[in-house]
C-alpha cells in the first residue's frame, strides 16, 4: 500500500501502466476503487494511471479541515510533485471533477486536459438541501416503491447511486453491494462509520460547498481541452449546460438511460469516452509545430 505524506496528511495512492500520465479523482464518499477495479486496468495499457484516496476517504488520513476544492487541488498538485510529474491529464467524477477544474484554474501548466464525469458546481447549479425535507422524503418513497428500503441515516450523497442501481444491485436498508468505490456500504459498516466521522467530526460538510473560484467568469479562462461526460438522467445536467457556455474548448457526451453514478455502474462508458479523447489530445500535442523562442 503506497502512501505519501502530503501537507501533513497520509494519502493512499495506486499507479498502473506506462505512458502519458493520467490522474483520476473520485467523488465524495467513494475511494480509489471507484476507478481501480474496472477502469484502470483498461486504460493502463496506454497511459500511466494514478488513482488515490482523497483526504478523509479510503485509507488516507482524515484531518479536521482542508476539504475545499482549492485545498484538494493543492493535495493533487502535491501528489504530482511527490511522484515527479510536471503535468498530466486529469479526470474527475462529481466533486472530483470540481477538484480537477480547480487545479486547471490555479495551476494550468500542470493540466494537459480535463475529463469531467457528471460534475456539479454550486456556483453554476445550487446544491439540494442537506437537511431533512420533503425533497428527501419523496426520493426515499420513490426508492421504496422500487424495492430499495432507505433509512433516514443513509447518507444523502448515496441517494443518486441507489436510484441508479435500483433493481440491479440495490439491497434493503440502503446497502449497496458490489459497486466499485463504495464497497458494500450499509449502516454500521466500516465505510459507513468512516463517512459519519468525516461528516460529523470534520469541517468537510461546510467546506466542500465553500467555493467561490469555480464561477462562470473564471471558467472561461480554462484553455485545456475538456471532455464533458454526463448521464441523461443526471440531476447535474444544468452544470453541463453552463460549462458548455463557459469552456472555450470542450466536447460533450450524454449517455442515455443512466444517471450521476454511471461511471460506477457502467464503467465501459468512461473507457469509451476517455480513450479517443486522450488520443486526440496527445495527437494534437505531437502534431503542434515547435514554438520559436520569443514568439507566441
Image: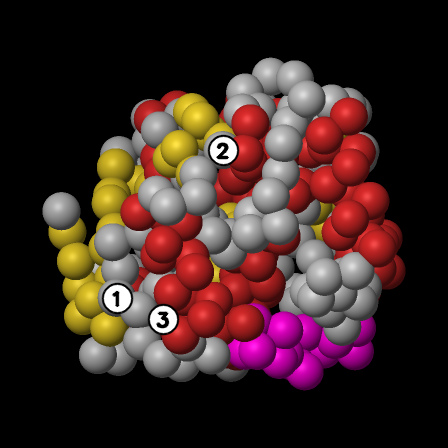
- In the displayed image of the protein, which residue is found farthest to the top? 168
Q: Which residue is mark 1?
A: 61
Disc 2: CA contacts within 10 A as few (<14), some (14-19) or many (>=20): many
Instruction: Give the x, y percent position of residue 6.
Output: 24, 73
Residue holding disc 3 = 75
Q: CA distance from mark 3 to mark 2?
A: 31 Å
Secondary structure category for the residue under label 1: loop
> Which one is closest to the eye, mark 1 or mark 3?
1
In the image, 219: left or right of 295? right
Residue 149 appears in which quarter of the rendering? top right
Secondary structure under tag 2 reads loop
Disc with the residue nearer the chain's start (3 vs 2): 3
Main secondary structure type of the part rendered in magenta: loop
Tag 1–tag 2 contact (CB < 8 Å): no
The image shows residue 249 at horizontal and vertical percentages of: 73, 55
Asked if labels 2 and 3 touch by Cβ distance under 8 angstroms, the answer is no
The residue identified by callout 2 is 175
Q: Residues within 10 Å of mark 3 (few under 14, many from 20)?
A: many
1 or 3: tag closer to the N-terminus? 1
Colouring convention used in this rendered image of the protein:
secondary structure
In the image, taking residue 272 as reference, residue 194 lies left or right, namely: left
Spatial separation of the CA atoms under disc 1 and disc 2: 25 Å
> Which residue sits at x=34%, y=43%?
189
Given this view, does label 1 or label 2 mark the residue nearer the observer? 2
Amino acid at each position: 500500500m503506497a502512501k505519501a505524506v502530503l501537507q501533513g496528511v497520509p494519502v493512499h495512492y495506486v499507479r498502473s501502466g506506462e505512458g502519458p500520465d493520467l490522474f483520476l479523482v473520485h467523488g465524495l464518499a467513494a475511494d480509489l476503487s471507484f476507478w481501480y477495479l474496472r477502469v484502470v486496468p483498461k486504460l493502463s495499457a496506454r497511459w500511466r494511471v494514478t488513482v488515490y484516496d482523497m483526504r478523509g476517504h479510503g485509507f488516507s488520513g482524515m484531518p479536521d479541515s482542508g476539504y475545499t476544492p482549492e485545498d484538494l487541488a493543492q493535495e493533487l498538485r502535491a501528489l504530482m510533485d511527490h511522484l515527479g510529474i510536471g503535468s498530466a491529464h486529469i479526470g474527475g467524477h462529481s466533486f472530483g471533477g470540481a477538484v480537477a477544474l480547480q487545479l486547471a484554474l490555479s495551476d494550468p501548466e500542470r493540466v494537459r486536459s480535463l475529463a469531467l464525469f457528471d460534475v456539479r458546481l454550486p456556483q453554476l447549479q445550487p446544491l439540494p438541501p442537506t437537511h431533512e425535507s420533503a425533497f428527501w422524503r419523496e426520493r426515499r418513497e420513490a426508492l421504496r416503491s422500487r424495492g430499495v428500503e432507505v433509512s433516514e441515516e443513509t447518507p444523502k450523497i448515496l441517494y443518486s447511486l441507489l436510484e441508479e442501481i435500483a433493481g440491479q444491485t440495490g439491497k434493503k436498508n440502503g446497502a449497496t453491494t458490489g459497486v466499485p468505490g463504495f464497497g458494500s456500504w450499509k449502516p454500521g459498516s466500516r465505510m459507513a462509520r468512516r463517512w459519519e466521522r468525516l461528516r460529523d467530526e470534520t469541517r468537510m460538510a461546510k467546506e466542500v460547498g465553500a467555493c467561490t473560484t469555480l464561477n462562470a467568469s473564471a471558467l472561461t479562462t480554462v484553455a485545456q481541452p475538456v471532455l464533458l461526460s454526463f448521464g441523461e438522467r443526471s440531476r447535474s445536467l444544468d452544470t453541463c449546460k453552463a460549462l458548455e457556455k463557459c469552456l472555450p474548448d470542450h466536447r460533450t457526451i450524454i449517455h442515455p438511460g443512466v444517471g450521476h453514478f454511471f461511471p460506477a455502474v457502467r464503467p465501459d462508458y468512461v473507457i469509451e469516452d476517455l480513450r479517443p479523447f486522450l488520443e486526440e489530445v496527445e495527437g494534437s500535442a505531437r502534431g503542434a509545430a515547435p514554438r520559436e523562442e520569443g514568439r507566441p
